[in-house]
Image (cartoon, rainbow, N blue to C red):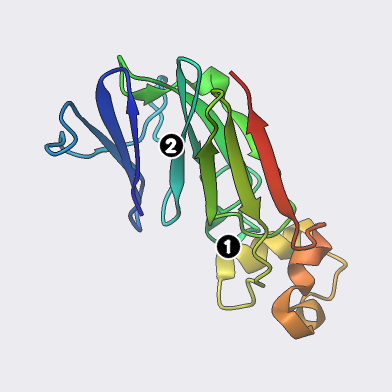
Amino acid sequence: EPSLTHHHDRYHLTLRSGLRAYHCHSTDGLHYSAPEPWRFDTGEELGSYDTQAHWAQTGDRLYLVYTRRAENNAHVVRHRAPLFLSEYDPASGRLLRDTEQIAVPDRGAQLGNFGVAQSPDGEAWICASEWMENAGEWNPEVWSALQARHPRADLRALAALPGRCGLCELSGSDNSVHLVRIAP
């Protein structure tokens, strides 16, 4: 699931894999540099894996919208919430750590399938919907995080609810669709 954009006379491509996210660039749109793992300008690896990332442009700035492992999102399957946004520095090929912000909050459900649309007036719009899927006991990392976060909840009963969304609702999600505007 690549995401491609053209910015400052270069094509920028971000790529998904099961282990980590990568990016590369091209001057002609046909021949690309070798894929490199995403990193922040601090040298730290992004921590995104097995999900989408998309470009967003506003004015003269280029951003990446992504999910990643964070200190408090192990309760979401494959760390697919929240959606983060960071400015990309084309000169270094890195994301600027100090610009990272949450674009769509973590409410217990996955946000790994989302899109970014560019408007003619220089804005970008992120559209994401909550994916109400219980982690269940098949994912020990998520199950442990849910037990730690909600020690008094009957997680087995919530996981057994019709529609498989009881665990997601425990954290506040309700299958909402989120639309976020990024202005220049």
The residue lying furthest to the front in this view is 120
What kind of residue is marked 1? Val
In the depicted structure, whether residue 75 falls above or below residue 115? below
Identify the residue at horizontal 75%, vertical 53% (top origin).
107
The secondary structure type at the circle numbered 1 is: helix
Q: What x and y, as percent, mark residue 177? A: 71, 54
Instruction: Determine whether, in the image, residue 160 is placed left or right of residue 91.
Output: right
Quick check: 177 above or below 11? below
Q: Is 91 placed left or right of 107 in the picture?
A: left
Residue 170 sits above or below residue 55 on the image: below
Which of 90 and 99 lies nearest the eye of the viewer? 90
Label 1 and label 2: CA atoms lie apart by 18 Å
Residue found 63% across the figure and 71% down from its top: 135
Quarter of the figure that contains the C terminus: top right
Q: Label 2 near label 1: C-beta < 8 Å?
A: no
Is any part of residue 156 visible from this angle? Answer: yes
Query: Which quadrant of the figure has residue 149?
Result: bottom right
Disc assigned to residue 30: none
What residue is shown with label 2?
46
x and y percentages locating residue 164 in the rendered image: 71, 79
Q: Amino acid at mark 2?
A: Leu
Q: Position of residue 77 (x, y in %)?
A: 58, 62
User: Which circle's residue, 1 or 2, is located before the other in the chain?
Assistant: 2
| Residue 160 shows in this picture | no
Q: Is residue 92 left or right of 41 when viewed as pictured?
A: left
Task: Characterize the local packing of mark 2: few (<14), some (14-19) or many (20 or more) Cα atoms within 10 angstroms.
Answer: many
Residue at figure coordinates x 33%, y 55% from the top left: 17
* Relative side of 29 to 59, left or right: left
Estimate the x, y position of residue 132 in percent, counting from the top left. 68, 68
Q: Report helix, strand or loop for mark 2.
A: loop
Report the residue that reaches farthest toward the right.
Answer: 152
Residue 77, numbered circle: 1
